Amino acid sequence: MITVPAQPFPHSFDPAHVALLCIDFQRDFVEPGGFGESLGNDVSRLRTAVGPTRAVLAAFRERGWPVIHTREGHRPDLTDLFPAKRDRGNPSLRIGEEGPMGRLLVRGSKGHDIVPELAPLPGEVVVDKPGKGSFYATDLETVLRARSITSLVVTGVTTEVCVQSTVREANDRGFEALILSDCTGSYFPEFHESALAMFAAQGAIVGWVATSTDLLGAIDSSPVPAKDM
Ligand code: C5J
């Protein structure tokens, strides 16, 4: 077991049953000209999560532990886009309209891609999702159960929207989640802080919160399993 200093108390996971979840690190949220900016947000606020997530990603890849990426987006014909989602806010451009990085939040457009620093490697699972939660209308639960994964290390954007929806869905399905505070980000610093506080409140009612430094320190100091003779 690996034990990570965390809020509200240390969190232990079995490295044989853990996966890293990288939620929606897409150009549409993180780069200028995408969906996030069309809603009037300062997208530079999300960039801080990229560097620390890259370090955690490297640690998982070095050890051969599973990595799962998610992307929020829609079919090109938008048949999976509810009006309840399309019509929210007062954006300069709506989902499906043409922006500087192609059609906003549409699968196949440049803006829908994961940022190059965190791009999936061949063999890593990429889950395309039409909603905020990563379990809704996807096969994520099947992928996790087929690999006997019980613990998730969670990174991604935005903390209070897709990360929060996903960890709540994960908790309801019996998965344990360790959310990394510096590997998540929001356009609204106060929402980031509140969401992290909510996860860990009431004895980790939704999950545990730690920094990437705490996680990487715990991983580095854990014994390397002996190789089979
Ligand atoms: C949003 C997300 N904020 N990935 N999506 O609409 O958090």
Image: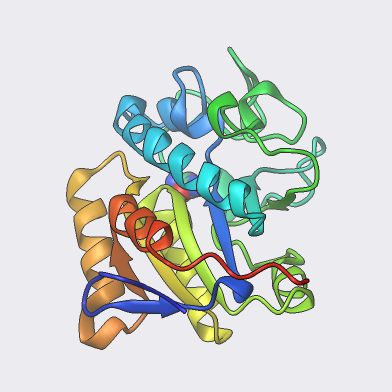
Residue 8's x, y, as percent?
A: 21, 78
Foreground residue, 208 or 82?
A: 208
Foreground residue, 102 or 167?
A: 167
Tell me what residue is drawn at x 61 percent, y 25 percent: 111
Residue 38's x, y, as percent?
A: 45, 26
Foreground residue, 67 or 171?
A: 67
Colouring rule applied to residues = rainbow
Tell me what residue is drawn at x 48 percent, y 63 percent: 153
Foreground residue, 136 or 216?
A: 216
Asked if one can make out residue 31 in the rendered structure from this viewpoint, the answer is yes
Residue 102's x, y, as percent?
A: 67, 19
- Whether residue 196 is situated above or below residue 26 in the rendered picture: below
Asked if one can make out residue 88 in the rendered structure from this viewpoint, the answer is no
Q: Quadrant of residue 198?
A: bottom left
In this picture, residue 171 sits left or right of residue 211: right
Tell me what residue is drawn at x 47 percent, y 69 percent: 167
Residue 106's x, y, as percent?
A: 70, 34
In this picture, residue 191 sits left or right of residue 89: left
Tell me what residue is drawn at x 32 percent, y 84 percent: 205
Q: Quadrant of residue 98?
A: top right
Which residue lies most toward the front here?
229
- Whether residue 51 is situated above or below residue 178 in the rendered picture: above
